[in-house]
Amino acid sequence: MIASGFFFNARQKSTRRYFLAGHEVPWWAISASIVATETSTITFISVPGIAWARGGDFRFLQVVIGYCLARVIISAVFMPWYFRGELVTVYELLQTRFGPSVKALAATLFVIMRTIADGVRLLLTAFVLAAVFKAFGVSGSVIGLGVVMIVFTLLGGIEAIVWIEVVQFAIYIGGAIAAAVVLANNVGFEHAMALGAAAGKFRLFDFSLDLTKTFTFWSGLIGGTFLTLSTHGTDQYMVQRYLCTDRPRSAAKALLASGIVVLAQFAMFLFIGVLLYAFYGETAPVTAPDQVFPHFIANHMPVGLSGLVIAAILAAAMSSSLSAIAATIVSDLLPWGGLLARRQAAGPAAGETAGWQPAPQDDKAAMRVSRVITVLAGVAQIAVGLAMQYTQRSALNTALAIASLINGPILGVFFLGATKRASTPSALVGMSAGIAAVAVVAFTTKTAWPWYAVVGSMTTFAVGMIVSWISTARSEDSSPSPRPDPI
C-alpha cells in the first residue's frame, strides 16, 4: 500500500488529480472499488456466521434486493446531478439549493460519522492483526494500520485508494473462494447441499411485516433501498469514486455492475456458512456465530491458504476514507471551497484533460491544506480506535448507531432539495427532527436497523415540507391584500 502511494505520488500535482483522479479511472476499476469499499472485515467474517447459526439461512439476501434497486435509482436520477458542473463533493449540491449553512451541516455530520466509523474499522482490523502478531498488541496494531493508511493516502490521493481497492477486491474474493474449496473438499459438496436443504439453510424470503425482524422481504426492499440511497447516493465516501470517472454513463455502469457483484459475493459468503454448518454441525467451539469462520481459518485451513485468508480479512478492512474527509473539509468547510469552485480560462495542468482548474496559487494552497487535513483525519481515526478498545459497548453497534443517525437525515435533505417549496430554515429543522427521530427509534425501540434510514429520511422530508408550508402561509397572510383590478 505504501509503495502504491509512492507510485501515484508523482501525478498528484493538483486538487483535481488528488481528489478526483483527473476523471481518468475506468468504470470497471471504480466498480471493484465500490464493492471493496462496502465490504468490511465484519462482512467477511460475520455473513458466513449468519447462515451457519441455528435458524440461519439465506434471508440476508433480501437486503441485497434493496441494495440493487437503489443502485438503479441512483444511476437514473442521482448520477446526472453529480456531473453538472465540476463537483468536488456531493454536498456542493446542497449549497446550490439551500446555501452554505445546510451544506456545512451535512458535511460536518459526514466528517464526524466517517471518522468514528473508520476508527472502529481500524480497531476491528487490529484485533485480527494482533491475533496473528501478538507482540504488536491491539494498540500497536491500531497505530500501525493507521499510519499505513495515512502515508499511502497522503502520497497517492484518491487514485492510489481506488487502485489499491481493486487489488484488495481480488485478494479477499480469492481468499473466500479458497476457504470455500477447502471446506467443500472436507465435507463434500453434495453432502453439504443435502444437509443445508434439510436444515432449511436455503430459505430466502420472509414476507412477515414485523419491524423488529432484521431480514424480511419488506425490510430488505424498503429499508435496504433507503439505506443504499443514503450510503451510495449522498455519502461523499462513495460519491467521490463516481466522480473519478469521466461521465455519468461510466459511473452508472460501475455502480450497476457493483450490484451484481455484491449479490454474488453475499451469496458466496452465505454458502460458506452452509459449508461451515456441514463441517461443524450446530455446535462449534465458539461463543458467537461471528467466530465460527475465523475458528475454521485458524485451526483447519492449510498453512499458506490460512495466510491468504487472513490477508483477505485485512484487505477487506483497508479502504481509506481520508481522501473523502479531506475533500469535504477543504471544499465544504474551509475558505478554499470557493477557490476550488472557481472556473479559470487558463489551460489544464500538464498531463490532465481540459476542463475546470482553480488558479495555480489557490490550488497549491489547497493542496497543502489537504495533505495536512489527511494526516489530522488519520490521527483522529487512530485516536477513536484506541479509545474504543476500552469501552464496554460493542464497537460495531456504536458504528452502526452513529451511521444510522446521519445517513437518513442527509438523504432526506436531498429529497427536500428536489422540491421547489423547501427553504434553508425548513431543511435545517427537518434534519434536526430526522436525527432526533432516528435516535429515539434506535435507542428506545426494538426496530431493526434497516428501517433507520427510512425513519431518518422521511422524518426530515416530512418536517421540512411542513415547516415550508407554514412559513409560506405566514408570509402570504402578512403580505398586503392585492387591490382589485380597475374596471
Image (cartoon, helix red, strand yellow):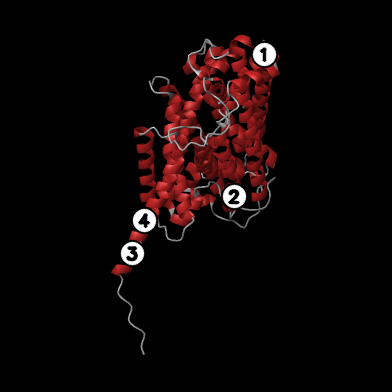
Res 79 label: 2
**Residue at coordinates 61% horizontally, 32% vertically from top-left?**
36
List the residue tagged with mark 4.
466
Q: Position of residue 225 (x, y in %)?
A: 53, 42
- Viewer-closest of 209 and 2: 209
Residue for point 58% across, 12% down: 280
Question: Circle 1 sits on which residue?
Answer: 187
Say which label, 1 or 3, has the lower sequence index.
1
Rendered view: 236 above or below 205: below
Specify whether residue 70 is in view: yes
Mark 2 neighbour class, 10 Å CA radius: few under 14, some 14 to 19, many 20 or more: many
Tag 1: Cα neighbours inside 10 Å, few (<14), some, or many (≥20)? Answer: some
Query: Is label 1 or label 4 in front?
Result: 1
Q: Amino acid at mark 3?
A: Ala
Categorize mark 3 by other alpha carbons within 10 Å: few (<14), some (14-19), many (20+): few
Q: CA distance from mark 4 to mark 3?
A: 11 Å
In space, the residues marked 4 and 2 are separated at their CA atoms by 28 Å
Against 138, is 252 above or below?
below
Element type at mark 4:
helix
Label ID, residue 473 = 3
- Horizontally, residue 484 falls left or right of residue 307, namely left
Whichever of callouts 4 and 2 sits on the residue coming sooner in the sequence is 2
Q: Closer to the observer: label 4 or label 2? A: 4
Q: Between marks 1 and 4, how big is the CA–CA gap?
A: 60 Å
Q: Is residue 473 above or below residue 225?
A: below
Q: CA distance from mark 1 to mark 2?
A: 46 Å
What's the residue type where badge 1 is placed?
Val
Residue 136: x, y in percent?
52, 13
